[in-house]
Amino acid sequence: MTDKKYVIQPGDGNLMAAKAIVHADTDVVAVYQITPSTQVSEHVAEFKRSGEFPGEVRVLHGEIEAFSACYTASQCGARVAGPSCSQGLAYASELLHAMPGARCPVVIIAANREISAPINIHAGHSDVMPFRDSGAIMFFAKNAQEVYDFTLLAFKIGEDLRIQLPVWVNYDGFEISHTTVINKILNEKGIEEFRKYLGIYHRPCSMLDMEHPHATGGLVLPNAFMEAKFALVDAMEKAPTVIKEATDFYSKNFWPVHSFIEEYEMEDADYAIVTMGSRFGTVKEAVKQARANGEKVGALRVVSFRPFPVDLVRKALQGKKAVAVLDRSGVYGSAMPPLCEDVATSLTNTTRAPFVRSFIDSLGGRVLTVEQALEIIQSLKSPKKWHDDIRSTWVGVEKGDSI
Amino acid sequence: MSNQEEKFCPLGNGQAACAGCTINQTIEPTVLGAANPKQVIVVGASGCSIVAQYIYPLTAWKINFTHVIFETTGGAMTGMEAAYTALKNKGRLPKGTNDVQVLGIAGDGATADIGLGSLLGWLERGDPGVYLCYDNNGYQNTGTQSSGTSPKGSHTTTTPKGFLTSPNAQGKDLIRLALCQPATTYAAMTTLSTLWPHDIEHKAKEAFEAGREGPAFLQCISPCPRGWGYPADKAREIGDIGIETGVIPLHHVRKIGEEHVWYLDYLPERYVEYWKGGEIRQDVHPIEEWLKSQLRFKDLLTDPAKVAAYQRRVDHKWKELRRDCEPYGS
């Protein structure tokens, strides 16, 4: 009994994010509320009031101000978290793009929601996708448990001196942020052990280091700009090693956590569905039912969207006959939506590449049904008719090309 | 010891400012106004100051400095204050860090226009710190476009020959804006001049003292030879004319208890009688002296109605000042 490092905690994704912020000994949380991530800041404010959270909470006048506070607090060597989503991310986009370049390991906790117009408060990945090339590390959680796990790990990964980048923990709005489930969280013993592993953040060139004054953030002209940006490539190349170390530690000492991808019935599958986030549960159920009918089908979930696990995805999909990629954000006038684009390019210039078919589903909180997922599986069986056609199918939309 | 303190310059070599630029003369005495200038951490919004003092790999800064996005100086200052407070409370400050004060630096565009919400938000939150607006009456870094503090009728590239394309460039009163927030502990207007060369040092000192308790706001009218059109070596003379004509009223406001108390620091001859209840002396230092000193007013000067209107605006400012200072007998 004394070895037990966790307690059972019922709660939704927002509570799990707030708990992880507290358990990671975060120094500064800067917030501006926005549905559906509001409760993260509410919980943290309450933990501050009750004394459970000794860090500083700052409520600012808009997301651009909140993330600006995150930006400089991080440069002062503080451990920083910023919860937001949707319009808030769009409003703060200048800072969200600046953080990787300024090497601020802020943990950005995003209960993903669609972006206006039309205005919509429900789940979708269109808020985070504009930042996929910003230079930040990105995880997509499938449930509240993973929100907790990845938030804790995000601090360790981002603050690692080999990385020094912001880390996003993405989870579907309402479906994960507001759905209470049973989770494991660290108890006192577990927190102590994790914090020992995490350490405190030692920022090189902290703005609060008065004995070694220095300036950061100057104007960088063409002579050095590409080098400054190439440093992000270098960090991204090291990220898989750092992510693996962190998730291995966590899995060994606490409970198992995924690092890059999650596979379900993939080994002997001829067909596969690739997705991210909470819809993986629906897809798994469809795979289970199809398997019961003798279909050789599997499911693959991308866990770390940045850096994209190119090699692992290629290895998992090579030799399959056809692959359906389910995106939760639309594209308009370009060949493929973000996830499909990364999956397809992972298979470029390789042997035994499967057909890749793009599906766009569940925008604005619409629910992907098991029946629709089964139809997608069925459609994979006639890949020949897709020759020279890479258009996306909008699932459930009358004119969206079937399904 | 005092010798050593005097020798310390927060800005050194590595400058890229235009000839005659007054931003260094604005920033340096401001930093030195802190009780412990080496413990000041600075965040600067995009603008002239970034380009003047920090083009990689050269920097003039000798104290900790970072740059932040154009319109978010206030949020950035709150983040620095929060980080300092958190790490202090947890006993995790680096060795030698013990008396930190936050200084935010932004131009008039970053303060009066795109970052106005950021300034007002910061003042409302009541965070300790000092906000310095180096006000050169326009977006001088990008080639003199009009800002919220550009005088009405002056030439900028977006108000060519003083033509107003939109109702901006009316000469916002940033001091009054700052005082709309009850938490503001201090607000002052200063400039660079030969008449009162130490005004900025004095006010910076007061701002840093007041800035321990809450937000202190300092507006320095920093003449810009390029944007205003005057010889590069005449900045302080321009400041003198601004003071004497009443265009730049040197004044400051302190929070005492819950009240904002107004103080006039210099009473130009033009308004001496007026201050005692008499008339404004229209023959003393009329607005033409100010307008003729800078090429940006060349077109305005050709229209007597506009000149008269400018004079009325300045005189009205003094009417308001007298109203606000009178109860406190200054």
Image (spheres, coloured by chain):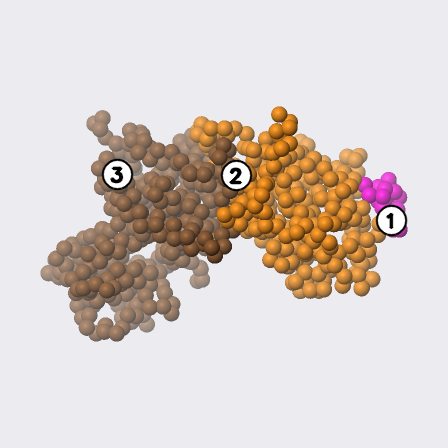
Chain colours: A brown, B orange
- Looking at the image, the residue that sits furthest to the left is A294
Q: Give the Cα separation between the discs numbered 1 and 3.
A: 78 Å
Residue A50, by quadrant, is top left
The image quadrant where one finds the C terminus of chain A is bottom left
The disc placed on residue A398 is none
Between B111 and A181, which is closer to the camera in this rendering?
Answer: B111
Q: Give the x, y percent position of residue B1.
A: 62, 25
Residue shown at the point (31%, 47%) measured from the top left: A239
**Residue A250's disc number:** 3
Residue B142 shown left or right of residue A251 in the figure: right
Asked if the stretch drawn in magenta spans residue B281, the answer is yes
Disc 3 secondary structure class:
helix
Picture disc at residue B284: 1
Disc 1 residue type? Val
What are the residue bounds of the magenta stretch? B267-284
Q: Residue at x 85, y 46 (%)?
A: B270
Q: Which residue in the protein does label 2 denote? A: B64
Q: Secondary structure at mark 1?
A: loop
Q: Is residue A372 visible?
A: no
